[in-house]
Image: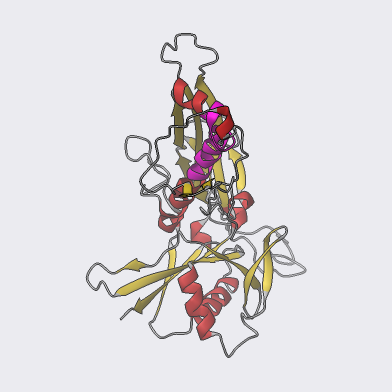
Amino acid sequence: MNRDIMGRKLCAGSAMTYAQGAQIQKKIDASAPNFINTNEGHVLSISDYEKMLYDYRLRDFPIMVNFNSVEAMGYPHNFNEQNKIPTNTVAMNPKYGNGNAGLPDFSKTATDTDYGRDNWKKVFVKLYGNSIQYDFFARKYEERYGSFEDLVVKDYNDMIVDFNRVTAEAFFNGTSTSVENDETVSLEYCGILKQITDITAITAGTNLFDAINTKFTQQMARLDYSAEPDVIVMHPSTYDILVKQERDRTINLNSITSEIVPGWKVPALNTYVKTFPIMLSKYVRPVADAVTPTKYTHKILMLNQSMIDRVWMFNDGPLFFTWADANEPNANTRLLTNKSMMSYENYVLRGPQTGAHLMFTYDVAVS
């Protein structure tokens, strides 16, 4: 896990010598340390402090960079999917086809023209955004007298982190029931947990690897679609169950790694026919049963990243604005500084009926 430590450089001196005759008056929070720690006899010592503002907030939001970037063709964005291939192939007489010696005929007597191409779907992009605001005195005071480097920069970075965290949560667990819902129905994404339709319940006590391997093998045996997953996503606590189950079968899991994006190695599951990288996500969390609170349902996702579209409008990524600037106070009598970021986009699982995206559920009783 990456955890950024955001440091801030000292920009104004915080100590003045006794000879300068300065008096320092500060408003100190009750939780702040007592900087004067020695004042007795011939000793007056004012302790210094580390010039680093430590920040351990999580900043990892993976795999979204692997999805297709698709510019919306309008509001809504419309697309069509073919769900059938006509069957017109038959065995024929090599000399006469479907005819006879007197009248050879190599055409098929009955022709299937149904290609299943009238399957129009739509998706409405959603708007996620946030803002930060500073009044004139606070910003200027921080710039001139702040003990750390301009915190406005860190505030801006924190705004981006918060945006990524909220949209990552909505990517998996968004409350909208369909990507076709517009803003009058829901403002949120339709999370991919709601978009997956191929769901397998693993019986309690069943080995997770065996269930996953059996399902994937069945998927490969299908004759109607050739799509298949390429990554596994699960919660760390679900992965803990898998690891313990596979403790004695090291060929399936232990010491196997794979790259989920270039340079980023993750654990991998080695099925009989394919090795899957495993992305551990905090957002695919186990859910307590409403009737039996001690029972938790774990979810394991198998996704095809090339069949997930990020449909966007106006810009392939967040838009950033400064819509009030104290340095240019036109019609800004309060001298505020306001910064905003927003993104018009939505995520669509293509071909949920093809087996490209699978979900497994597994109930675990917690004592």
Where residue 33 appears, x then y in whole percent? Answer: 44, 49
- Decide which of 220, 13 is in the foreground and name it: 13
Q: Residue furthest bottom?
A: 248
Q: Can you say which quadrant of the picture contains the C terminus? A: bottom left
- Decide which of 158, 100 is in the foreground and name it: 158
Residue at 30% x, 75% y is 295
Horizontal side, residue 353 vs residue 271: left or right? left
Where residue 152 appears, x then y in whole percent? Answer: 54, 32
In the rendered image, the vertical position of residue 136 relative to residue 55, given as above or below? above
Tell me the chief SS of the magenta region: helix
- Decide which of 75, 338 is in the foreground and name it: 338
Where residue 32 appears, x then y in whole percent? Answer: 42, 47
Q: Residue furthest right?
A: 95
In the rendered image, the vertical position of residue 205 relative to residue 264, given as above or below? below
Q: Can you say which quadrant of the picture contains the N terminus? A: bottom right
Residue 209 visible in the shown view: no
53 part of magenta stretch = no
Residue 4 visible in the shown view: yes
- Decide which of 34, 45 is in the foreground and name it: 45
Examine the image and state in which quarter residue 365 appears. Answer: bottom left
Read off the magenta span: 142-163
Residue at 34% x, 41% y is 186
Examine the image and state in which quarter residue 147 appears. Answer: top right
Horizontal side, residue 93 vs residue 341: left or right? right
